[in-house]
Every structure is written in structure tokens, then in C-alpha cells.
Image (tube, rainbow, N blue to C red):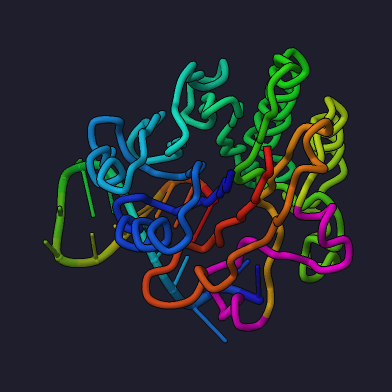
DNA sequence: ATGTCCCAACTTTTGGGA
């Protein structure tokens, strides 16, 4: 079972690249974030032509998350209590998956930062209450770099969002529900960045962060056969500012 | 580091968000 998570930064702007990537990499399940479209605009047919069923939670201009699956798609779960289109869960052939788009936070003293922490805590509560009998993948754009290894220059992030202690503690609490960050588990020393700012030549300068994460429940983490970032997908014309993160599971 | 990209709209440029 190949699962990918990818913040596409507008599915309208990225559709050709997403379809091309799906054809080339053949994931069984794709978890998308920042589709930035309403449900009635979601390209159901384009994904169906590649063999994918889809579940989309959209709100229009901002946010928007989706699950695409070639392994079945049932028991769709839509959103948290905030009403924003930031979470969709589904069961794909026995695997429970969640596509997450965590609030950005904007700045440490911004109300949006407190909202980010509340949102992460609500996700933690949802995951703490999950059905433990099924394998689960929780993935997406968490807008948090879990450790200093996950940012190009920790000193540049001092006093900024994405690397603050409360955000990292919120991720730790999510992990404590019994999850494993499988990219970091398999690559303990490489940064494995997933996002680079469009500005300032950040990609070519190596100014990135690892904020797109894939968590697998601890009981199935040893079934991970590969976990990697497809950095090449950040290159070329009209890229997203995020790269896809791919995990292969032998379930 | 803030040099870009994407969206909406009182749209052909600006402002908000990331």
C-alpha cells in the first residue's frame, strides 16, 4: 500500500502536475491539502479516470483537504469543530487515513496561533479516541517542524511559528497517542525538507523545512518499507511550494 | 531571506494569506 501526502497549493493551479505525478508514482491513497476549491469544483472525473475514488472537504478560497483512493473509500469523516476545511478521514481497504491541514498560526502573538494549538489539541483528542483495531495513517501539512533538524537554520526561526516549543509539544502529544513519525524514524539524520518558500530562491539555497508529516500507528510502523520526500516534484514549471511525502506499507 | 505564488474581486491592480 503506497500512501502519499501532498499540499498542492491550489488544485486548480496544480491539477496537471498532480495527475502526472499520480500516473508516474501510482499511490494507492493520496492525501491532499490546500485544494482551495469548493466541493462542486473538485475534479472527481479526472481522478476517476486514473482509478481513484475521492472524498473532498472544501470551502472555496482557502484550505480544502481530500482523500483519493484506489483501495476503497468508506466512512468519510469531515472536519473538526472549527468548521474550516482542514481534516478529512476515510477508510481505504482496511487502512484508516486522515488528511490534515493544520492552521498556519501566522505569528506567536496572533490569535491564529492560539487557534492552531487548539486545533492540534482537538486532533489529538480525536486520535486518542480512535479505533485501535485498524492500522491508521495521519498525514498532511502540520505547519510545525518537529525538531531543529527539520529546519534549515533554527536561529532564523527563533520567535517565529512552526518551530516554537508549544507547537512541538502539541505534536508530541499527538505522537503520544501511539503514532510514529515514519520519515524521521527511517531517516534519523537527514533533514528531509518538504517545503521551501517560493521567495528568495529558497529551494535552491536549501532554505526549507520538514512540516509535511506522516504518522503511522505504532503497531504497524514496522510494516513501513519506504518513507521519503519526492524532492524532484518541487522542481519544474508551476510547482507547489510543498513536495509530496511517500510511504510504502506492507499491510 | 521576504526577490513568489495563488486567490477573490467594487477585476486589468490590489490586498490577504501562506
List x then y, in percent, for residue A9: 44, 53
Look at the picture and state if A21 lies above or below A174: below
Q: Which residues are magenta?
A: A183-205
List x then y, in percent, for residue A165: 87, 44
- Foreground of the two, A149 or A92: A92
Quarter of the picture holding the C terminus of chain A: top right
List x then y, in percent, for residue A170: 81, 33
- Quadrant of res A101: top right
Measuring 59% from the left and 25% from the top, which residue is drawn there?
A94
- Foreground of the two, A47 or A203: A47
**In the figure, is residue A173 to the left or right of A64?**
right
Measuring 56% from the left and 80% from the top, which residue is drawn there?
A201
Q: Is residue A20 found inside the magenta-colored segment of the image?
A: no
Q: Is residue A199 found inside the magenta-colored segment of the image?
A: yes
Measuring 71% from the left and 16% from the top, which residue is drawn there?
A130
**In the figure, is residue A137 to the left or right of A4?**
right
List x then y, in percent, for residue A14: 35, 58
Look at the picture and state if A204 lies above or below A114: below
Amino acid at each position: 500500500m503506497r500512501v502519499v501526502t501532498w499540499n498542492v497549493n491550489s488544485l486548480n493551479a496544480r491539477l496537471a502536475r498532480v495527475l502526472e505525478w499520480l500516473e508516474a508514482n501510482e499511490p494507492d491513497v493520496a492525501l491532499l491539502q490546500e485544494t482551495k476549491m469548493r466541493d462542486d469544483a473538485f475534479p472527481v472525473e479526472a481522478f476517476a479516470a486514473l482509478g481513484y475514488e475521492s472524498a473532498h472537504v472544501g470551502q472555496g478560497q482557502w484550505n480544502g483537504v481530500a482523500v483519493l483512493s484506489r483501495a476503497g473509500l468508506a466512512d468519510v469523516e469531515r472536519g473538526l469543530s472549527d468548521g474550516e476545511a482542514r481534516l478529512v478521514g476515510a477508510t481505504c481497504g482496511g487502512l484508516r487515513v486522515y488528511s490534515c491541514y493544520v492552521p498556519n498560526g501566522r505569528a506567536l502573538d496572533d490569535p491564529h496561533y492560539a487557534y492552531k494549538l487548539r486545533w492540534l489539541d482537538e486532533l489529538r483528542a480525536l486520535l486518542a479516541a480512535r479505533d485501535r483495531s485498524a492500522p491508521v495513517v495521519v498525514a498532511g501539512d502540520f505547519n510545525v517542524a518537529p525538531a531543529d533538524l527539520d529546519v534549515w537554520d533554527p536561529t532564523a526561526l527563533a520567535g517565529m511559528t512552526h518551530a516554537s516549543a508549544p507547537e512541538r509539544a502539541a505534536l508530541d502529544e499527538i505522537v503520544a497517542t501511539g503514532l510514529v513519525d515514519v520519515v524521521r524514524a527511517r531517516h534519523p539524520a537527514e533533514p528531509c525538507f518538504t517545503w521551501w518558500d517560493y521567495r528568495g530562491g529558497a529551494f535552491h539555497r536549501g532554505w526549507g523545512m520538514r512540516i509535511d508529516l506522516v504518522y503511522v500507528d505504532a503497531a504497524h510502523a514496522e510494516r513501513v518499507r519506504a518513507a521519503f520526500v519526492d524532492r524532484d516534484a518541487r522542481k519544474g514549471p508551476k510547482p507547489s511550494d510543498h513536495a509530496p511525502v511517500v510511504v510504502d506499507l506492507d499491510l
